[in-house]
Amino acid sequence: MCADCHSVNVRKQYDATNGTYATTWSDLSVGCEGCHGPGSAHIAWAKDKPPSDARMGLTVALDQRHGAKWTIDLASGNAKRDPPRVGDREIDVCAQCHARRAQIAEGYVAGRPFLDHYLPALLTSPLFYADGQQQAETTCGRRSCRAACTVTA
């Protein structure tokens, strides 16, 4: 569903008895809250700007990339990250939209474990090349998807 990534706080609310949906959302765009979590603490921070809050009131700080460098390990030919990644916070947040996956539970909020809400696709053809790279990141550019999208501003 396009809205999973292109909206914030999407709830499909499927009614199995009637076979219908009562979908709701809080923001129809790729908004800040999709990656940084609920914005109420950030708004409070913006009013006072306490210098002690380096996270600026954000629920999720996407700072694990800062200072990281990638080099090719000459022995293996593989890319190596320096310093090594600690934790899964950024992967959990980014994978909600940038991974091939199936949703298994509603209610994902940035900062929560990805695997509690999504099932990643196996690295198999035709979704992936033999080396594990995705065949295509998204299907939004397909004519059939654009025609199916009826959301207007």
Image: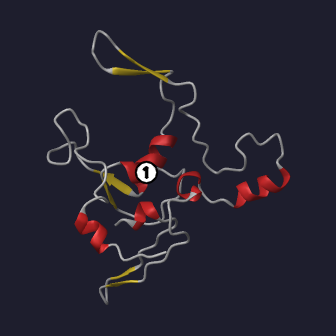
Q: Quadrant of the N terminus?
A: bottom left
Residue at the (43%, 78%) spot, across then down: 23
In-image side of 81 versus 53 (left or right):
left
| Within-10-Å neighbours for mark 1: few <14, some 14–19, many 20+ | many
Total numbered badges shown on the rendered structure:
1
The residue indicated by pointer 1 is 114
**Regarding mark 1 in the picture, which secondary structure is present there?**
helix
The x, y position of residue 113, in whole percent, is: 47, 50
In-image side of 32 versus 123 (left or right):
right
Q: Is residue 72 above or below residue 132?
A: above
Q: Is residue 141 above or below residue 16?
A: above
What color scheme is it?
A: secondary structure
Residue at the (71%, 54%) spot, across then down: 42
The x, y position of residue 76, in whole percent, is: 27, 14
The x, y position of residue 26, in whole percent, is: 55, 71
The x, y position of residue 122, in whole percent, is: 23, 46
In-image side of 49 versus 123 (left or right):
right
Residue at the (82%, 56%) spot, across then down: 47
